[in-house]
Amino acid sequence: MKRQPKQPSAFQQIFCTVGAITVLSGVGAIVLANQPNPSAQQSRIFETCNDTWKLGVGAIFGLMGATNPAGKNDDDEMTNF
């Protein structure tokens, strides 16, 4: 019998995707920032990469803040009402 590989959860897939886009944008911003005389197009791409980097970092912190530590169920708190 072949064992089926465990598929990552939706959270893991989203977190990895956001992390990859954030890192790529950060690297792109660093590369473009080191250009001696950037053209107008390079400046716009730098601004886009920089904004994407900032949004990605915020999204990563948001995803980490939204995780459920130690399997605690938030619905349990609502049963007292």
Image (cartoon, grey):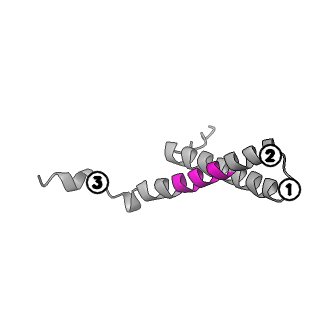
Alpha carbon distance from label 2 to label 1: 9 Å
Residue 15: image tag:
none
What's the amino acid at mark 1?
Answer: Gln
Predominant secondary structure, magenta span: helix
In contact (CB < 8 Å): disc 3 and disc 2: no
In contact (CB < 8 Å): disc 2 and disc 1: yes
Q: Which residue is mark 3?
A: 74
Residue 17, percent from left and from top = 61, 45
Q: Which numbered disc flags the more N-terminal residue, 1 or 3?
A: 1
Give the residues drawn in magenta, as a range: 50-60
> Most extreme residue toward the bottom, as rendered?
70
What's the amino acid at mark 3?
Answer: Asp
Q: Is 58 included in the stretch rendered in magenta? A: yes
Alpha carbon distance from label 3 to label 2: 47 Å
**Image side of residue 26 versus residue 64, left or right:** right
Circle 2 packing at 10 Å, graded few (<14), some (14-19), many (20+), is some
Q: Residue at x 73, y 44 (%)?
A: 44
